[in-house]
Image (cartoon, rainbow, N blue to C red):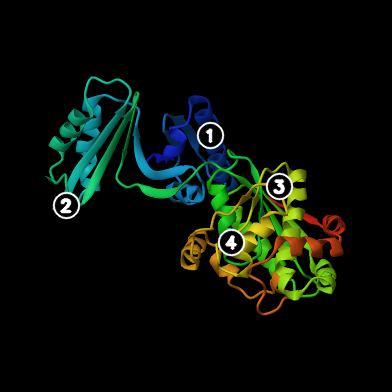
Amino acid sequence: MDGILVAYSGEIFIKSERTRRNFERKLVDNIKHNLKARAIEFQLKKMRGRIFIRTNQIKEVCKALEPVFGIAWMAPCYHLSTSNLNEIVEFCRKNYKHWLNVGEKFAVDARREGKHPYTSQQLAREIGNVIRRKVDLSNPDKKIYIEVRGDETFIYLQKFNALRGLPVGTAGKVISLISGGIDSPVSSIRMMKRGCEVVLLHFHSFPLVSRASIEKVKELAQIMRKFQKRIVLYLIPFGEIQMKIKAKVDAQYRIVIYRRLMLKIAERIAQLEGAKAIVTGESLAQVSSQTLQNIYVIEEATSFPIFRPLIGMDKEEIVREAKRFGTYEISIRPQEDCCQLFVPRHPTTQAQLKKVLEFEKKIKVEELVEEALSMAEKIVIG
């Protein structure tokens, strides 16, 4: 094999020409970053709808490309510096015994990009004629893929599906609230898949509780760095603020007040970072703060768009995604969630905005926001 043929997501291909070029540049940049980070030697060539990575480190390149959003599939391939029909056919005649065992059935999948003195069907037929194995177009044991692109030819036998989506950095920046549990890392990575650069924001109650959530979030940020080359993480102590809320807010309303305050703080950090939206890991009706009424009341706290990538997913679906992204084992480790501090066993599921606003007058919300921002710790990973 001479290298890896990469097909980028069809979403990129259907963009306008100018937008597509920008997306392609970002995808190439993200690929190069991952390869250089692993000290892989390579040469890269971009073509229409494809990227060819010439390398002799095939396995290492495939591993490096697994977390790159914007890639539809990748295939270890042979590369021929020719589009001559006879030369392609002769190459296949000499090598097919390495690809197909005796008794295996095969099919040829041929396609072309550019002008050539033969059709894709003729190419497939000529190759099929020199391979001394049984043809089965409907149920082959193996497929031989041939792509002729201009004056070059790529031949491959396997395609490995990738994450698809859009290249990270093409859709702007967002602030993502991350708790350390299962849901919020998944929602953050899902926004990366839509091309967003994600800045993480974690509220903790240390020293009223242990540092478990802080350490978990740092580890999760390291995992997320596979998908995004640089992670910014804000850590905000929330325990003292919670004690002030506890003194003046009815227990049933504390979680709603906590969440509204978090959004106000997130909005200020978004302004500092140049972000255009806030992301949460909420799933409708999963817990008390995520009922439709409470979501309505909580969202009123900010004028920023709130993205909820998991809103229609159930827990099993979210867990599957967490395992797929590699965050699950860290997320399930025990921790004390700051939102569970000083709350009753049965918090309200039907918060009333008028009552919430009355509580917020008592606690002087803007002063609490300033207090939180003054204690914020910013960590850059990558």
Quick one: SS at disc 2?
A: loop
Residue on which the image places disc 1: 23
- Badge 3 or badge 4: first in the primary sequence: 4
Towards the viewer: 161 or 353: 353
Q: What residue type is labelled 2?
A: Glu
Q: Distance between the residues labelled 1 and 4?
A: 36 Å
Find residue 152 and report its horizontal and vertical position in percent. 35, 27
38 relative to 280, above or below: above
Numbered disc in front, either 4 or 2: 4
Quick one: SS at disc 1?
A: helix
- Badge 2 or badge 1: first in the primary sequence: 1
34 relative to 86, above or below: below
| Quadrant where the image shows the N terminus | top left
Numbered disc in front, either 3 or 2: 3
Q: Distance between the residues labelled 4 and 2?
A: 57 Å
Q: Distance between the residues labelled 2 and 1?
A: 41 Å
- Badge 1 or badge 3: first in the primary sequence: 1
Residue on which the image places disc 4: 292
Quick one: SS at disc 4?
A: helix
- Badge 4 or badge 2: first in the primary sequence: 2
Quick one: SS at disc 3?
A: loop
Tally of numbered discs: 4
User: What residue sits 49% from the left and 64% below the top?
Assistant: 323
Find residue 222 and report its horizontal and vertical position in percent. 63, 57
197 relative to 322, above or below: above
Q: Which amino acid does label 3 sit on?
A: Ser
Q: What residue type is labelled 4?
A: Leu
Numbered disc in front, either 2 or 1: 1
Instruction: Determine whether label 4 and label 2 are within 8 Å by CB.
Output: no
- Badge 3 or badge 2: first in the primary sequence: 2
Residue on which the image places disc 2: 104
